[in-house]
Image: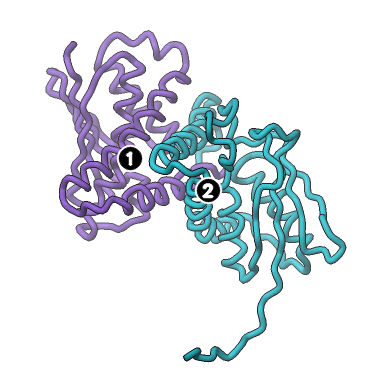
Chain colours: A purple, B cyan
Amino acid sequence: MADKVLFEFLHTEMVAELWAPHPDPGPGGQKRSLSILESIGFRVGQALGERLPQETLGFREELDVLKFLCKDLWVAVFHKQMDSLRTNHQGTYVLQDNSFPLLVPMASGLQYVEEAPKFLAFTCGLLCGTLSTLGFQSLVTTSVTSLPACKFQVVIRKP
Amino acid sequence: MSRPAHRRPECHKINKDLLVLTYGALVAQLCEDHEKDEDVNKYLDKMGYGIGTRLVEDFLARSCVRRCHNYSEITHIIAEVAFKMYLGVTPSVTCNNSSKNAFSLILDKNPLSEFVEELPAGRSSLCYCNLLCGIIRGALEMVHLAADVTFLQDRLKGDRVTEIGITFLKQPKERKSQRRK
């Protein structure tokens, strides 16, 4: 089933539709649009988290959970593994994808870097939502220097 | 990038769920943003149209369908190839009129509404899967076929099946435009 393509097209239309209507073009309006896309991603991530195989719900170690996100979740959702995972062992993780599928169709290189965040907002929310179902509160931000590579920074909040 | 030959079953399930869950969250967000069902339906159709105009290229590249000679063949291809390819279901096709330009796709099971038990309260006119109508309409337009595509029956509204009606419109003859004063 070519549902991967359908999801990618749906994601693009979502960004176009949910980004456009807000009349405030300044940072305030932008932030609201981003947070709408993130909240949709969060809901989806939470629901996906509930559908994961039983053995994953027994993870106790943070690092195991992040490794799971980088391998199993990323493969299930984006058909590839995360390219690298780094951590400071104090709750901050940097996940790097050198060829993020939702950015690949956009551009290659430095063009459109400022447009990239809106194509990453949903996925940030997705990571946050999945972590939430697995029992971890987190803050996820992204950075892009050159398409289609991007980094997701995950900070696990201590209870 | 070639697809791996075998995917673990749970990976495939997560992937299928991703589309359905994302769609559900999108409809929920549109319902929050718009009070009237007609507006939500309109946005879903518009987004579907945008998807359809691009999806058709992907479809033609993957499927290598032969040239069609009539509307019936086209509708059968939509049902038996496209729906199967993207949603994993094959609706049955009926012809609704003797001039053979109006057809229905009948779905027993609609994968997009798999997790929806019923429409939210106060949303009885919501066409939950209106995205599909837009997709079909957009895809057909890209191959120079104008059509009206709407839901005729909807299981979420209490009907027995979900029925999508496709009415192919004759192409208007070229007219010289006249400026009205």
- Decide: marks 1, 2 in contact (CB < 8 A)? no
Q: Is B78 placed above or below A142 here?
A: below
From the image, tell me which residue sits under label 1.
Answer: A37
Chain ID at mark 1: A
Q: Position of residue A136 (x, y in %)?
A: 27, 16
Among the 4 quarters of the image, the one containing residue B148: bottom right
- Mark 2 packing: few (<14 Cα in 10 Å), some, or many (20+)? some
Q: Amino acid at mark 1?
A: Leu
User: What is the spatial separation of the Cα atoms under label 1 and label 2, in whole angstroms?
Assistant: 23 Å
Q: Nearer the viewer, mark 1 or mark 2?
A: 2
Residue A53 or residue B156, whichever sits in front: B156
- Could you confirm whether marks 1 and 2 are on the same chain? no
Which residue is rendered at x = 16% and y = 19% of the image?
A91
Residue A104 visible: yes
Among the 4 quarters of the image, the one containing residue A61: top left
- Left or right: residue A59 versus residue B108 is left
Chain ID at mark 2: B
From the image, tell me which residue sits under label 2.
Answer: B38
